[in-house]
Amino acid sequence: MSLQIAAPGRSVGAMASEPVDPNVPPSGTGCADCTAAGGWWLHLRRCAQCGHVGCCDTSPEQHATAHVRSSGHPVIRSFEPGEDWFFDYRTGDFLDGPPLAPPESHPPSQPVPGPAGRVPPDWEAHLH
Ligand SMILES: [Zn+2]
Ligand SMILES: [Zn+2]
């Protein structure tokens, strides 16, 4: 995978740097907090500093943003298959960044919303 190719909508010069730790593996394949609470999520985001996997702001519990607030870790990366963008909460900018310790996304077989078996039939009514 080449780092020289910028994704559409992002400039090559905008790189997420501090605080990003490319050596920390993700906390798991699902939202750490939803998994603990028996909940479900729409999309997943990974903390680029400590590897915490949380659910996106469209998800019912918004654990990725909750982690940013509670930890002070300001940079996340998408944990969706095929997505490699970073987001800096301090500036509101979508950025490019380095490859992170694998796996770089949840398994493609994991459904969206997920996880399998915990998504209620009226899940769309719970989104933000
Ligand atoms: Zn969650
Ligand atoms: Zn973190």
Image (cartoon, grey):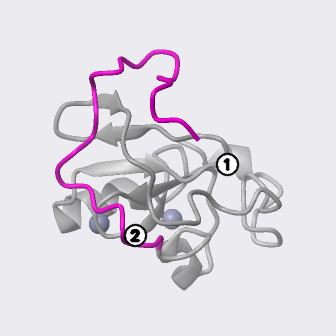
Q: What is the crowding at mark 1: few (fewer than 14 residues within 10 Å), some, or many (at least 20)?
A: some
Q: Is residue 30 left or right of residue 123?
A: left
Q: Nearer the viewer, residue 94 or 118?
A: 94
> Which residue corresponds to mark 2?
52
Amino acid at pointer 2 = His
Which residue sits at x=46%, y=35%? 3
Q: Is residue 17 magenta?
A: yes
Q: Secondary structure at mark 2?
A: loop
| Nearest to the observer: residue 108 or residue 120 | 108
Q: Is mark 1 within 8 Å of ligand 1?
A: no
Q: Quadrant of residue 21?
A: bottom left
Name the amino acid type tagged 1.
Pro
Q: Which mark is residue 81?
A: 1
Is the C-beta of the residue carrying label 2 under 8 Å from the nearest atom of ligand 2? yes
- Report the span colored magenta: 1-26
Q: Main secondary structure of the magenta part?
A: loop
Which of 60/82 is in front?
82
Q: At x 55% / y 66%, what residue is drawn?
A: 102
Which of the 4 quarters of the picture holds residue 111?
bottom right
Tell me the residue at 73%/67% (across/down). 115
Identify the residue at image location x=47%, y=70%: 26
Question: As drawn, is 49 to the left or to the right of 52?
Answer: left
Q: Position of residue 119 (x, y in %)?
A: 76, 63
Alpha carbon distance from label 2 to label 1: 17 Å
Compared to 32, does 3 lie above or below? Answer: above
Q: Is residue 117 left or right of residue 10?
A: right
- Helix, strand or loop at disc 1? loop
